[in-house]
Image (cartoon, coloured by chain):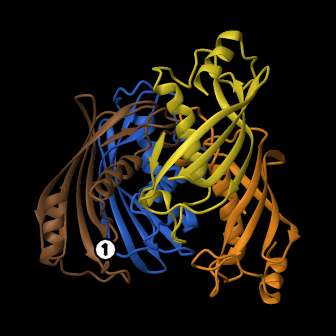
Chain colours: A orange, B brown, C blue, D yellow
Amino acid sequence: MKIRVYYEDTDTGGIVYHSNYLNFCERARSEAFFEKKLSPVLLSGHFVAKELCAYYILPAKLGDLLEIKTSLLELGHASFKLHQEVYRADIKLFELDIKLAYVSMQGRVQKLNSDIKEMIMSLF
Amino acid sequence: MKIRVYYEDTDTGGIVYHSNYLNFCERARSEAFFEKKLSPVLLSGHFVAKELCAYYILPAKLGDLLEIKTSLLELGHASFKLHQEVYRADIKLFELDIKLAYVSMQGRVQKLNSDIKEMIMSLF
Amino acid sequence: MKIRVYYEDTDTGGIVYHSNYLNFCERARSEAFFEKKLSPVLLSGHFVAKELCAYYILPAKLGDLLEIKTSLLELGHASFKLHQEVYRADIKLFELDIKLAYVSMQGRVQKLNSDIKEMIMSLF
Amino acid sequence: MKIRVYYEDTDTGGIVYHSNYLNFCERARSEAFFEKKLSPVLLSGHFVAKELCAYYILPAKLGDLLEIKTSLLELGHASFKLHQEVYRADIKLFELDIKLAYVSMQGRVQKLNSDIKEMIMSLF
């Protein structure tokens, strides 16, 4: 998953605004679904962030071409954890650990059934 | 309606990113509803942009305190037009003419009934 | 220029937030520079929006793959005009006419010299 | 610091997009400077996020009026840590721990001198 840095991603400090790295990582998670012709919005619910820790190593700038790498850390009963890294060429700029819960459209936490668990394992 | 310019609103050019002035104007339109304890999401539909023309006069910068002025230009059968201006102190920075249509949640254009017309006239 | 619609681009109305189409068009303008190993930030200045008119035809949704088409309408002394269209497959969703001025880093309008004019004609 | 949730803050899931809580917290940090007629951009540098952990408790929705509470956790040689909480009325929706470093405009980490340390202690 490659992402270009555009004007909208930067701020007046001349670098990518801190929360936009989370957007880049979310794009990579959604794209994992889309490229297999799946949607991150399932019939019975969708995934929401519950916890995350982010580490800013080096800043990205306008025009940078970033690569996002995603791996599955843990698969629980109603949530899963991913580790995501943002690179420019072979330089690591950013790391994210994120726990995503599976919730109904009304926001209630739901169990991941075996079909959804298999899907998650095939995607990440 | 006063709006402060924060880092997220700026870009690496050191000024507010061009599309964020549209966001500021949308905030002012929604706030007109919220401050009267109303919601811009009605039972039978909501409002979407159909056309807009925007004029960039002077740039806003980090920390600027902006004021948005909104007036009703025209009220039609299924849409209405607003004129909005963004000021810093008494200097005009930006102007917007926007046509908003009333559509159902499925996206079908709907007639503005007399209750909704009265509401629009009382808000803007 | 293909752009995927992600969660960040949508709003609670279930469609792409109106100002994000301007961001998509800006990405296409910047990408025209980047793909030729150029930067939209030149030594002597950069380009800023002066006027734009936007036409919303049909909404885009999460997961849509959009294509942006850009053409040069007019090339003036200190500004130029582009026409941009956003498509999903062969359905036109959005149109933009935008006038961009060439300004110094301090924000003063500058003449487009012949090198910059040639560059613009080669990009769009 | 009160923040209204507008359309731009929400996504197609009907709730505030996860990274926008970071924006809300950044607005509160910058506003602490602005309301004392100070700027978060100092002569010798500015502050950038180095690490953060975020906890999503309950979602915010369109029209919600949020309150951000900020407290200083730790003040180091070249960085400081804040704890920030986002409330809707007296319900806590979100928590953030963030470490901010003081860097020069070229991005080099700089020592916080005693003037800047005093300023930080007076702001948070």
| Residue C84 to residue C109: above or below | below
| Residue D35 to residue B118: above or below | above
The image shows a total of numbered marks equal to: 1
Q: Position of residue A44 (x, y in %)?
A: 64, 86
Please name the residue shown 13% across and 61% down the image: B121
Please name the residue shown 82% across and 46% down the image: A92
Question: Which of the 4 image quadrants contains residue B1?
Answer: top left
| Residue A52 to residue D117: above or below | below
Lateral position of residue C59 relative to residue B98, left or right: right
Query: Can I make out residue D70 in this image?
Result: yes
Towards the viewer: D30 or A107? A107
Towards the viewer: B4 or B20? B4
Three-letter residue code for mark 1: Leu
Q: Which residue is mark 1?
A: B42
Question: Which of the 4 image quadrants contains residue B103?
Answer: bottom left
Please name the residue shown 51% across and 39% down the image: B11
Q: Residue furthest top?
A: D114
- As helix, strand or loop, the secondary structure at mark 1 comes to loop
Quarter placement of the C terminus of chain D: top right
Lateral position of residue B6 relative to residue D112, left or right: left
Lateral position of residue C55 relative to residue A84, left or right: left
Q: Residue furthest front?
A: D90
